[in-house]
């Protein structure tokens, strides 16, 4: 079961997935130069969006290949561990069946940033400025 802050409502993480398959041009031997397939994850939280991939040939690793906030550019030089959006993405990916580790694309390449055993250190919820009415039981049934 997902923590409440990953469910529907204000400031929550929206997730969609799609299958993908990429096949390269035929090489000299007639076979494709590459072939990748797996899942693409698309994340959205407020105005921010990001993505990750999980390859069929390495299903225990989910790789975050971007997370963006157009008002605050990110250099890709460091791991922004306190970023609520990144924390939500990592926490979600660690709940996916079979995912054992999560990596993040930095300027120097992919770096492992969390393993399933580390899950307790990642799922700290973002702190909303104001609780959403959907999350507050006192507003249940109110119009």
Image: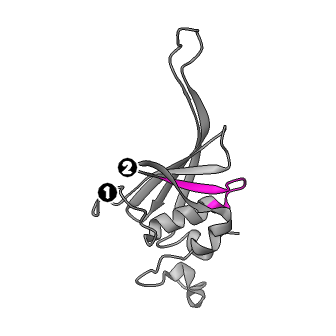
Does the stretch in magenta take in 101? yes
User: Which of 46 and 98 lies nearest the eye of the viewer?
Assistant: 98
Badge 1 or badge 2: first in the primary sequence: 1
State the image coordinates of residue 50 (x, y, percent, origin top left).
45, 54
- Identity of the residue furthest to the bottom in this view: 138
Q: Which residue is mark 1?
A: 75
Q: Quadrant of residue 122?
A: bottom right
The residue that appears at 53% across and 13% down in the rendered structure is 26
Q: Which residue is mark 2?
A: 107
The secondary element bearing badge 2 is classed as loop
The residue that appears at 50% across and 17% down in the rendered structure is 25
Disc 2 crowd, CA 10 A, few/some/many (<14, 14-19, 20+): few
State the image coordinates of residue 33 (x, y, percent, origin top left).
54, 20
Above-or-below relation of 10 to 52:
below
In the displayed structure, does residue 101 sit left or right of residue 72?
Answer: right
User: Which of 94 and 29 lies nearest the eye of the viewer?
Assistant: 29
Magenta residues (range): 94-104
- Identity of the residue furthest to the front in this view: 108
| Camera sees residue 77 | yes
Query: CB of mark 1 within 8 Å of CB of mark 2?
Result: yes
State the image coordinates of residue 137 (x, y, percent, origin top left).
60, 87
State the image coordinates of residue 58 (x, y, percent, origin top left).
65, 42
Does the stretch in magenta take in 59? no
In the displayed structure, does residue 25 sit left or right of residue 96?
Answer: left
Disc 1 crowd, CA 10 A, few/some/many (<14, 14-19, 20+): few
């Amino acid at each position: 079961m997902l923590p409440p802050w990953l469910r529907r409502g204000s400031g929550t993480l929206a997730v969609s997935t799609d299958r993908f398959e990429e096949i390269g041009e035929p090489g000299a031997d007639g076979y494709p130069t590459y072939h990748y397939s797996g899942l693409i994850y698309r994340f959205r939280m407020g105005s921010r969006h990001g993505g990750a991939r999980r390859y069929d040939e390495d299903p225990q690793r989910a790789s975050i290949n971007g997370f963006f906030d157009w008002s605050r550019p990110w250099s890709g030089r460091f791991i922004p561990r306190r970023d609520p959006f990144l924390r939500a993405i990592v926490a979600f990916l660690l709940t996916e069946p079979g995912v054992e580790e999560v990596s993040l694309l930095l300027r120097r390449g992919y770096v492992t940033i969390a393993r399933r055993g580390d899950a307790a250190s990642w799922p700290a919820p973002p702190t909303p400025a104001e609780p959403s009415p959907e999350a507050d039981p006192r507003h249940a049934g109110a119009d």
